[in-house]
Amino acid sequence: MHILRSAKKRLWAGKALGLGALALAVLTSCATAPETGRSQFILISEAQGLQLGADAYRQIKSQKKISRNPKYTQPVVRVGSRVAAVSPRPNYKWEFTVFEDDSPNAFALPGGKVGVHTGLFKVAKNDAQLATVLAHEVAHAIARHGEERMSSQMAVGLGVGVAGAATGINPNVLAQAATLGVVLPFSRTQEAEADAIGLKYMARAGYDPRQSIPLWQNFAKYGGNRPPEFLSTHPSPGSRIQNLQRMMPQALAEYNRSPYKGR
Ligand SMILES: [Zn+2]
């Protein structure tokens, strides 16, 4: 809501946009996040998001070294596919790629393109801990956080793109927003939302949600005084664990109902 209001204000004050185009942009941009029901400002259609995610993923795969070590690739694909299958978008073209990178990190692009660093295995000690991270990433993709982030970039920095988004997208503006979208971190709100949604998805897929707590503790320990990149844009470990504990009874109920539990 805040994004919508500030973006609108800037547009009204700034570029000489036709009122009709603006109204259309705002009208066509209301979305709701799954599970939490939070209102979102998204100017990019689902089809456009799929395309942008696929393009950015291809680019990353051509630039970063891909791991073929089954010690990493097998659990990532096994756990990731199981979580994606219980999400509301099992039909996305989900991809889980492991990159040779020592930092404990992971990322998600629109449309279900997920990347995992080999360094993640320093903190994820079992399938359920790996599921914590993968479900968090799946949640980012399902809640369309990348598209949301790009949309606020387009509205604030590239005002002209808003009209384009509503009427017929300007590919240059979109490409620029996509680049920014991949580079910029998610907001704290999005991170907390991905934790909340991810906890449900991992439980639904039959992974013990209580393992999310040691996983985030491992992350905090690993970082010492200088937290790894993945943590720097995420909620502080203390508040994150408090939030998880608050949601745990519901997640455990979901876990106990899961037909995949114990598999
Ligand atoms: Zn995240």
Image: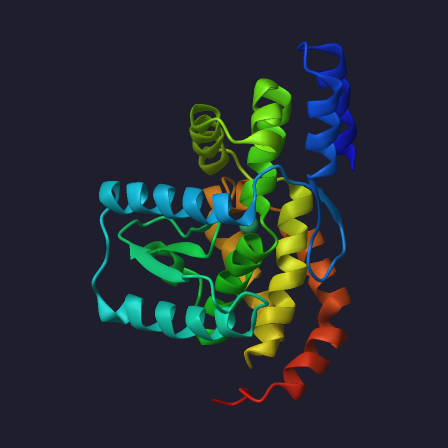
4 vs 135, nearest the viewer? 4
Q: Position of residue 50 (x, y in %)?
A: 46, 49
Report the number of numbered marks: 0
Among the 4 quarters of the image, the one containing residue 241: bottom right
On screen, residue 243 above or below 223 = below
Q: Is residue 235 visible?
A: no
Q: Is residue 142 visible?
A: yes
Which residue occupies 62% across, 49% down?
A: 191
Which residue occupies 47% across, 89% down?
A: 263
Q: Is residue 7 left or right of residue 175?
A: right
Q: Position of residue 13 (x, y in %)?
A: 75, 11
On screen, residue 191 above or below 206 = above
Among the 4 quarters of the image, the one containing residue 151: top right
41 vs 257, nearest the viewer? 41
Q: Position of residue 163 (x, y in %)?
A: 61, 24
**Quadrant occupied by the N terminus:** top right
Among the 4 quarters of the image, the one containing residue 21: top right
On screen, residue 82 above or below 235 = below
Which residue occupies 63% across, 25% down?
A: 155
Q: Is residue 142 left or right of residue 38?
A: left
What's the colour scheme?
Answer: rainbow
247 vs 183, nearest the viewer? 183
Q: Position of residue 24 (x, y in %)?
A: 71, 31
Which residue occupies 69% across, 74% down?
A: 251
